């Protein structure tokens, strides 16, 4: 299996501003919940605090977790690594995963914006869906095993995701790997088993979060500067604040529900019946 369902996260406080969580090969979400109960008050007291998680699974949408920090009045920054799927520029062997990072900042009425992006041009799931449908992928999404651009999704899955912006994207992913794996003491992407399937056991990847209290740094200037910056973006016709589309979709889903493929519902129901 990939996840130890009965795992109970272990939380340690080796220093006032440091929270260390061992997910014990379990899901990332309970590990994050356990750690945030220590991280948030520490950041409010000290002005800044960090939290590492090791031996965990995919944490899903990283922006969701930093949004929770912003809801608590803190600037939240998050990093999470993944099994290797990106080659270094000029190389022919994958070293890092798509490795997202995210940032959210608090405003007058909750999170003001969310930046959530990965080191690759598209998510690996996009290529998998094209492969399942037998459709070619757009050029620029991925590389074949020799490091050449490809539109064949099967070759792409054997090769590498294309880093967004070339060497700059690889550098971003490497930064995330340093934070979420090296600093957190988690398994490196190049050593981690895939998230999907049954081969290799738990991937035991990691996350890292930083929480900062605006009052401890810029005081009243924070709100003034943030308001001006966000206004300069939002006041332009056709532009949007990072995260606003997500919030609008959320409001729509809460009011009108979510469309789900009947095949997926059937699969979930069959899995639920099989677990009883």
Image (tube, rainbow, N blue to C red):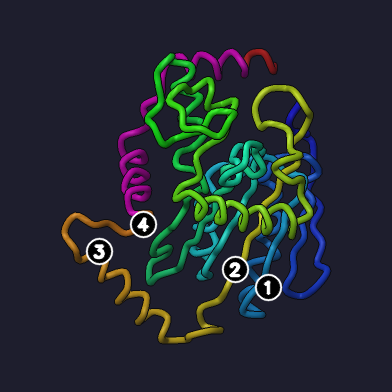
Numbered badge on residue 211: 2
Of mark 1 and mark 3, the one earlier in the sequence is 1
The stretch of residues the image draws in magenta is 244-271
In front: label 1 or label 3:
3
- Quarter holding the N terminus is top right
Per the image, the residue denoted by label 4 is 242
Asked if one can make out residue 107 in the rendered structure from this viewpoint, the answer is: yes
Instruction: Confirm or deny contact between disc 2 and disc 4 (CB under 8 A).
Output: no
Task: Pick the residue in front: 35 or 180.
Answer: 180
Q: Magenta-highlighted stretch: main secondary structure?
A: helix
Instruction: Confirm or deny contact between disc 1 and disc 2 (CB under 8 A).
Output: yes
In front: label 1 or label 4:
4
Q: Is residue 148 left or right of residue 260?
A: right
Q: Residue at x 49, y 37 (%)?
A: 123
Residue 274 x/y as whole percent: 67, 13
Residue 110 x/y as whole percent: 42, 64
Q: Residues within 10 Å of mark 1 (few under 14, many from 20)?
A: many
Of mark 1 and mark 2, the one earlier in the sequence is 1
Task: Pick the residue in front: 267 or 204.
Answer: 204
Can residue 241 be found in the magenta stretch?
A: no
Per the image, the residue denoted by label 3 is 234
Q: Residues within 10 Å of mark 2 (few under 14, many from 20)?
A: many
Q: Please determine whether, in this image, residue 217 is positioned above or below residue 263.
A: below
Per the image, the residue denoted by label 1 is 42
């Amino acid at each position: 299996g990939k996840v130890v369902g009965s795992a109970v996260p272990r939380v340690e406080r080796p220093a006032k501003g440091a929270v260390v969580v061992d997910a014990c090969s379990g899901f990332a979400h309970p590990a994050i919940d356990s750690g945030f109960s220590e991280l948030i008050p520490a950041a409010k007291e000290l002005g800044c605090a960090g939290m590492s998680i090791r031996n965990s699974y995919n944490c899903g949408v990283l922006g969701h977790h930093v949004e929770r920090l912003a809801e608590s009045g803190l600037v939240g920054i998050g990093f999470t690594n993944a099994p290797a799927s990106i080659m270094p520029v000029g190389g022919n062997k994958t070293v890092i995963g798509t490795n997202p990072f995210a940032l959210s900042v608090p405003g007058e009425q909750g999170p003001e914006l969310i930046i959530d992006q990965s080191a690759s041009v598209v998510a690996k799931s996009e290529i998998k869906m094209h492969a399942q449908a037998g459709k070619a992928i757009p050029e620029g999404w991925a590389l074949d095993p020799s490091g050449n651009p490809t539109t064949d999704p099967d070759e792409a899955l054997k090769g590498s995701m294309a880093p967004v912006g070339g060497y700059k994207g690889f550098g971003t992913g490497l930064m995330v790997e340093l934070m979420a794996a090296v600093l957190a003491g988690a398994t490196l992407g190049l050593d981690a088993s895939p998230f999907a399937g049954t081969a290799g056991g738990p991937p035991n990847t990691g996350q890292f979060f930083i929480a900062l209290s605006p009052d401890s740094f810029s005081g009243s200037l924070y709100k003034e500067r943030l308001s001006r910056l966000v206004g300069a973006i939002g006041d332009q016709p056709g532009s949007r604040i990072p995260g606003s589309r997500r919030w609008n979709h959320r409001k729509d889903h809460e009011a009108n529900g979510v469309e789900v493929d009947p095949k997926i519902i059937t699969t979930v129901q069959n899995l639920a019946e099989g677990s009883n």
